[in-house]
Structures are given as C-alpha cells and as structure tokens.
Image (cartoon, rainbow, N blue to C red):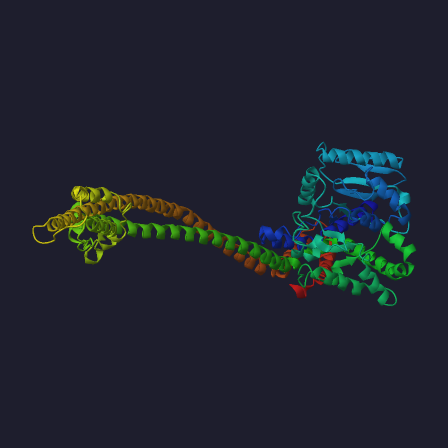
C-alpha cells in the first residue's frame, strides 16, 4: 500500500473512531430535548465535543485553592510559597480567588498569568506575580475589569511533585460564596451562571467542623443551591475534617489505620443531623472527609500517631477524588447523566411542590383574610342597615301629636297630702314647708307612665330629664308667697277659733287651694319638660340614625371595594393551581420520558447501522467499504460498552 493510501486509511479510521459515539449522543440530545427546561438545566447536558471541566466551589476561607493545589500535585514544602503568591498581597487567612481561576503547571520555573484573550504574561519572581494578582483583584473589585473566562495562572514547575502526573482535566476555582463586597458577590453569581450549568463535576468544599454550607441558606448560587437534585454531578469535600476533638478521639479508639468507609459514614451522619439526605445523595462514595495544608503538616509534628493513622486514608481519598474527576469528564460519563433524570425529576418535583405549596398556602391565607374582612364589612353593613330600618320605623311613630298624647294620658305625678296644720301661724308655716318639700319631690319624681303606653315604651324609657328640680322652687315660692304674707301679718301666733268662718278655717282653705294650684302648675311644667326632653331625644335619635346610615354606607363601600380584590386573588389562586397542575403534569411527562432513554439509544443505534450499511454499499472503493464494515462491526462493542456504563438496570 502506498504511503499516501496508508495515510488516507489511517485518517478514515480515525474519523470512524471519532464518530463511534455519535449515535448515542444523538439519542441523548433527543432525550434531553424531550424534558422540560427545569430538568434539562440540572442535567449539565452538553454534546460530545464540548470542553470538559470540573468546578470547585464553597465559602471563602475553607481551603478550596489549597485543595486544588493538592490535587494538582503541589509539594507540601512549596505550598506556603504558592499560597502567599496567590493571595496577591493579602494577609494570610484571606481569600486568594478574585475571579474564576484555572491553575496549570508552568512549562518552566516562571509564573504566568493569562486574562481573557490577552497573551500570557510571564514573571520570573514571586513578588512580581504577587503584585499582578493584587492588581487583578483590585480591578475586579472596582469593576474596571470584566473577566469573560477563567484567569489562567501558571505555577512554577519546581513547585510540583515530579511523580504526580499532570491531569488533563480543567479544574476551575470559583470565588467563594458570600464574599466581602457587592462587586465580588455580583461577579460570583455571574461566574456561577456561566460555568455551573455545563460543569461535568462540582466539588462542594466546606469545613468539616461547620457543615452549614450544605444547608438551605448556605448555598445561594444558581445551579448549586439545590445540589441534591443531581447528586452524581456533585462531590462533597470537607476540609479540617479531623480538627474536632471528637473525631480525633474516634481515631484513637479505633486501632490501626483509619478506614475510609467508617469516616465517610460518620460525615454522612453528621450532615443528616442538619439536613435530610435522599438515598441517592448519601452514597458514601460522594463524600470526602479530608485534611491537608499547613495545619495538617503541623499535626504530623504535634500528633504523629494521629497523622500516621489518618494520612494513608487521606492519600486513598485524594486518589479516589482524582479518579472521580477524571471519570466524570469522559464522553460516556456525560451519557450517564441521562440515568440521573428520574432522580433529578423527583428532587425538582419535591422542591418545587414545596415552594408551590407555600405559595398556595400564602395565597389562600391572603384570600381567606380578604374574604373574612369583606364578609365582616358586609355583615356590619347589613346589621347596621337593620338598625337604621328599625330606627327609621320608630321615628315615623314619634310624631309631636303622639308624644303629646303619651305625656298627657300616661304621666305619674304623686299627689301631695301634707295634712292639717296646728292651730297656729307657726303650724301653718311648718305645713307649708312640708308641702313645698313634698311637692318638690313629686316634681322631681314625676315621669311618663311607660307601662301603660303602647308602641312608644322603648323610646320613653330612654328619655332622660336633666336638672329635675329646675324651675320648681320659683313656682312653689310664688304659690305660697301671698299666703305667707297673710300669715306674717298676724300679731298673735295662736288662732282663737277654728270653727266655720274663723280665720283658721279661711287660712286652711287658702292653703289647700295653694296646694291644688301649685300641684297643677308643677304637673304641667313636668309634662312640658318631659315632652321637651322627648323632643330632644328624638332629635338625638335622628342624628344617630343619620350617623348609622353613614356608617352603614361606609361598611357597604368597604364590602363592595373588597369584591374586586377577592376576585383577583381567586383568579390568581386559580392560575397558581393551574400552574401547579401543569408543572406536575410536566414532571409526570418527564418521568415517562426519562424511561425512554434505552429505547432512544436502540432507535439511534439501528439508524446508525442503517446509515453505515448504505455508506458501505455506496463506498467508492473496497478499502473504504471494508473500513466502514469494520467500524460497523465495532459499533456493537461500543453499544455494549455504553449500556454497561450507564447501568441498564437503572433505566
């Protein structure tokens, strides 16, 4: 075979090799497109050619960058130097990550920095690189620089362990959640929206002695806050995992080398004390309790026995984590995401239903309050309306004529009988005093006889007479003044005779006449005053009726005004209920679709075989046709490999 022909054969075979999984990714694309957007967004669905990368994310100051350096193989002796430079002039203990960073091995002993599309800048000493990273952070905080992609930092080659192979996987270090200022926070969210959706694997990093980073409010970035919805995309890494005294005591109690499963189970149990984990989430292989960095090196000197027992486990866990990182970025790993669809759907459905339930309950509560308030206003308007009707009806019966007849026919005024006086002037004066007192009391005690009234009893019972004795004293004084003048004109106190025609008999007749006259006058005055009081009370009732009518109208306006908001709330609740039903239907449809991946694979596999059969039949030469036949035969093995990798029992 000629060299040119051999080169063509190799190129053709390489092309067949590159296309061996195309059918599977077509099935995956069809599968992803059949799902609703909220599910698709959580599956990190991307095509076969998309660049693979892993994200490291967590709160500030938990050791994310140090973890990355460890995984990349930075020597422990060089870790302080690397950490100092990466902080960009900030004090120890402050964040090293100003924006999304990607760290690589330098081809030589220089530091390098590449920002956006600019050429890589190289620095021969640590101070220059440290200063440049400081300027980068300042520019980011002042919004003078917008990073369109990760800033790539090249770490000098001498900082790495020569025995640790360089990983081909890009690992992106996102700025810590809840950073120090608003500019950094805004940038963190922008970076999360850009890189999280298509990350092949996300390492959630937090301190082992503070697991709040996994709780509801601990993770606030898009695509990360509900990490349990797609558990295969996440690994939980805890730093300072053996700092707590209880963990160290546990290590001492278990003789021999620390066992990975034991401490993974313990970490899961610790997390479950704060948040519930589903069975898919709490697979032990997803959790990595680690110790590294300067604090762990110090433990080697301070507690050599503890270090000796735990360090082998640390090496094992780091190796497993590196293996997971490598495995997550293969094309087959991306297909494996499809199997997670039912887990994602269940989690999204659960979380969304929880939110929808809360919203529905809140709407129902608002609607209930509005209906209650409107009902109370309507009830008040109706009750006051009844009172107004009753008052108006009563007012119609309270005419001047009826009131005058009531007071004329049914009035109580006690009759005064002071008795006969002694046969002396002083006796007459004494009985006059008693009579005036008795008449005054009768005047004050006079009242309408409501028991004998018909139809107006309730009205009269509420009439009140103020200043009951007012005016009576003048009448009493006037009534007896002339008689008293006669009595005062006598020179002798005692009457000589009391018989008919005597002064005593004449004065007694005068006294009784005065009693009758003043009693008649007082009774008339009392009736007049009670009638005036009745008129005043009737006016008051009219004012009260008017006031009640205003109040009734106010409540009615309030009730009428509440109808439209209630209708809006009812419509909103109906729309919310419909949206919830549609969401649940989408989730059910997605669940049905999630079971179709295997059949989609079969359909695309058959279509691929048919396409290749046609290509073989129409090949321009035997060599091309034979290569196509070999590739088609090989396709059966590729299919077995795909089905084996995605665990067909799970779909």
Q: Position of residue 371 (x, y in %)?
A: 42, 52
Question: Where's residue 188, x and y in %?
Answer: 70, 42
Residue 549 position, x and y percent, is 30, 45
Image point 87% across, 48% down: which residue?
A: 74
Residue at x 70%, y 54% (from the top left corner) = 214
Q: Is 313 drawn above or below residue 444 in the view shown?
A: below
In the image, residue 641 lies at what x, y percent? Answer: 73, 61
- Total marks shown come to 0
Using the image as rendered, state which of residue 384 and residue 561 is in the foreground: 384
| Nearer to the camera, 135 or 562 | 562
Is residue 397 found left or right of 141 in the rendered image? left
Q: Check the image and name the residue furthest to the left.
A: 501
**Residue furthest out toward the top:** 144
* Horizontal side, residue 192 vs residue 169: left or right: left
Whether residue 252 can be seen here: yes
Please identify the quarter of the rendering in which residue 210 is found: bottom right
The answer to whether residue 626 is seen in the rendering is no
Between 266 and 303, the one nearer to me in the picture: 303
Q: Is residue 186 above or below residue 353?
A: above
For the C terminus, the quadrant is bottom right
């Amino acid at each position: 075979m000629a060299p040119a022909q051999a080169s063509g054969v190799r190129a053709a075979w390489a092309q067949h090799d590159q296309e061996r999984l195309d059918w599977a990714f077509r099935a995956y694309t069809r599968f992803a497109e059949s799902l609703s957007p909220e599910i698709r967004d959580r599956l990190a669905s991307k095509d076969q050619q998309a660049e693979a990368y892993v994200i490291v994310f967590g709160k500030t100051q938990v050791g994310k960058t140090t973890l990355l350096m460890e995984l990349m193989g930075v020597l422990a002796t060089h870790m302080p130097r690397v950490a100092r430079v990466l902080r960009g002039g900030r004090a120890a203990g402050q964040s090293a990550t100003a924006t999304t960073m990607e760290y690589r091995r330098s081809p030589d002993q220089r530091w390098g920095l590449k920002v956006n599309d600019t050429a890589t800048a190289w620095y021969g000493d640590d101070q220059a690189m440290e200063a440049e990273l400081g300027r980068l952070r300042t520019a980011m905080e002042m919004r003078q620089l917008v990073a369109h992609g990760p800033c790539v930092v090249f770490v000098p080659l001498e900082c790495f362990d020569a025995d640790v192979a360089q990983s081909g996987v890009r690992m992106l270090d996102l700025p810590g959640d809840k950073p120090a200022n608003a500019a950094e926070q805004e940038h963190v969210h922008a970076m999360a929206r850009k890189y999280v959706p298509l990350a092949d694997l996300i390492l959630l990093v937090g301190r082992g002695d503070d697991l709040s980073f996994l709780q509801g409010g601990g993770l606030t970035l898009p695509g990360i806050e509900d990490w349990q919805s797609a558990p295969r995309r996440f690994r939980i890494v805890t730093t300072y995992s053996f700092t707590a005294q209880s963990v160290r005591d546990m290590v001492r109690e278990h003789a021999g080398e620390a066992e990975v499963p034991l401490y993974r189970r313990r970490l899961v149990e610790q997390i479950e004390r704060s948040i519930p984990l589903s069975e898919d989430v709490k697979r032990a292989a997803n959790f990595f309790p680690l110790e590294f960095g300067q604090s762990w090196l110090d433990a080697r000197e301070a507690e050599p026995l503890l270090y000796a027992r735990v360090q082998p486990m640390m090496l094992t866990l780091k190796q497993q984590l590196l293996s997971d990182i490598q495995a997550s970025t293969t094309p087959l790993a991306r297909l494996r995401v499809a199997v997670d669809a039912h887990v994602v759907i269940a989690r999204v459905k659960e979380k969304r239903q929880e939110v929808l339930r809360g919203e529905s309950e809140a709407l129902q509560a608002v609607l209930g309050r509005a209906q209650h308030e409107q009902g109370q206003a309507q009830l008040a308007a109706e009750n006051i309306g009844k009172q107004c009707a009753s008052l108006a009806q009563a007012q119609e019966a309270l005419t001047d004529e009826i009131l005058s007849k009531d007071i004329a026919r049914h009035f109580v005024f006690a009759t005064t009988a002071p008795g006969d006086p002694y046969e002396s002037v002083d006796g007459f004066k004494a009985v006059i005093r008693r009579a005036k007192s008795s008449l005054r009391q009768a005047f004050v005690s006079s009242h309408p006889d409501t028991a004998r009234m018909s139809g107006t009893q309730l009205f009269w019972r509420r009439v009140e007479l103020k200043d009951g004795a007012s005016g009576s004293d003048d009448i009493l004084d006037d009534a007896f003044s002339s008689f008293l003048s006669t009595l005062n004109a006598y020179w002798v106190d005692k009457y000589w005779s009391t018989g008919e025609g005597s002064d005593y008999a004449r004065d007694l007749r005068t006294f009784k006449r005065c009693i009758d006259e003043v009693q008649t006058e007082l009774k008339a005055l009392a009736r007049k005053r009670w009638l005036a009081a009745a008129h005043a009370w009737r006016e008051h009732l009219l004012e009260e009726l008017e006031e009640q009518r205003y109040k009734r109208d106010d409540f009615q306006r309030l009730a009428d005004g509440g109808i439209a908001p209630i209708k809006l709330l009812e419509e909103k609740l109906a729309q919310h209920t419909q949206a919830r039903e549609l969401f649940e239907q989408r989730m059910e449809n997605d669940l049905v679709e999630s079971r179709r991946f295997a059949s989609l694979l079969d359909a695309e596999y058959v279509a691929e075989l048919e396409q290749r059969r046609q290509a073989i039949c129409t090949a321009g030469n035997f060599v091309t046709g034979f290569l196509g036949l070999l590739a088609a035969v090989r396709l059966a093995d590729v299919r077995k490999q795909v089905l084996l990798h995605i665990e067909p029992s799970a779909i």
